[in-house]
Amino acid sequence: MSQFSGPSDLGDEERDALEALLFRMADDEYVAAERYIEWQIYAPTLESDLALANVAQDEYGHARLWYDLLQDLGYEEEELIWERPPEEWTHATLVELETESGDWADTMLRTYLYDTAEQLRMEAIVDSSYAPVCDRVGKVLAEESYHREHAQNWLDRLADEGDEESFARVQAALDRLFPHALTLFAPGPHEEDILEFGFRTETLSDLRTEWLEIVVPYLESLGLDVPEPDEVEPVRTTGRNGDHTDDWFDLYEDFTATYRQLDFDKPTTLRGEGA
């Protein structure tokens, strides 16, 4: 049973921990969506173009769910997105990496790795001690299942060993992205408090283990050589503490450009009508 029904129930330490969790979840979703929309009109087929556009729309919607809760805690949308310095974003580096030019395999593999982890993360907050989080999890879980299925359908085709070039692209994407996928489970500030206060009910280490038990057998079933997790050289930046790759700062400049150039007093809100 939830013990925190809303912002008024939170002390300073609980609030700091909840904010850290919400920012990570929201930022992951928002930045993933920004990368997906770069494929508009460039995807291999019209059907895949529309499907990925729907995935991006879903991810923006999920980000909105968590940013909404941060607004309930007193934040304004400008400071959550458009005016927040790039070094204050806490998304994992997996979602920020620039897509290899024209490489659909890179995007489909990233989608699979991310959405498999996202489903596990959502399951770990189904029984969150913060009631407003619990109220939103069901919608996210339902849509993440579709995202993962879409990515797997494409990987099944792209990793066909009969097409050596396509298979090589998937393997190259796996080699590039797998170390960054592990950053999804890197701890950030207030991690111990997130668990102690019950905002999430599983440790990041446990989530990582569960994720590996799903993704490794599936990828190996495609004939891919999956890096040994304990032997992967850790990436220098994880994103969770605000340390990011150069790709992120370029992306940030791109998606905030219109806001800065037009000097909007009030950008179009992500918050839903009546929320």
Image (cartoon, helix red, strand yellow):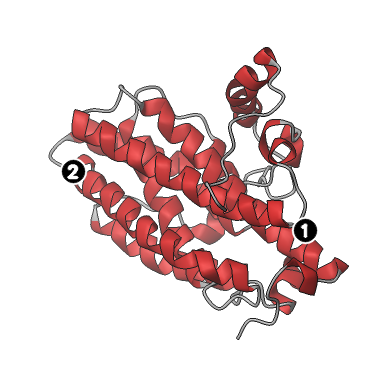
| Disc 2 element | helix
Residue located 63% across and 81% down the image: 2
Residue type at mark 2? Arg
Q: Residue 200, position in %: x, y?
A: 62, 72
Q: Is residue 183 left or right of residue 221?
A: right
Residue located 51% across and 58% down the image: 229
Q: Which residue is mark 1?
A: 189
View extreme (front): residue: 274
| 245 lies above or below 271 | above
Any part of residue 233 in sight: no
Q: Is residue 157 left or right of residue 266?
A: left
| Disc 1 element | loop
Q: Is residue 48 left or right of residue 123?
A: left
Q: Mark 2: few, some, or many residues within 10 Å (few <14, many ≥20)?
A: some
Residue type at mark 1? Pro
**Earlier sequence position, callout 2 versus callout 1:** 2
Q: Is residue 180 left or right of residue 119?
A: right
Any part of residue 173 in sight: yes
Tally of numbered tags: 2
Q: Mark 1: few, some, or many residues within 10 Å (few <14, many ≥20)?
A: some
View extreme (left): residue: 162
Q: Residue 160, position in %: x, y?
A: 17, 43
Q: Which residue is mark 2?
A: 157
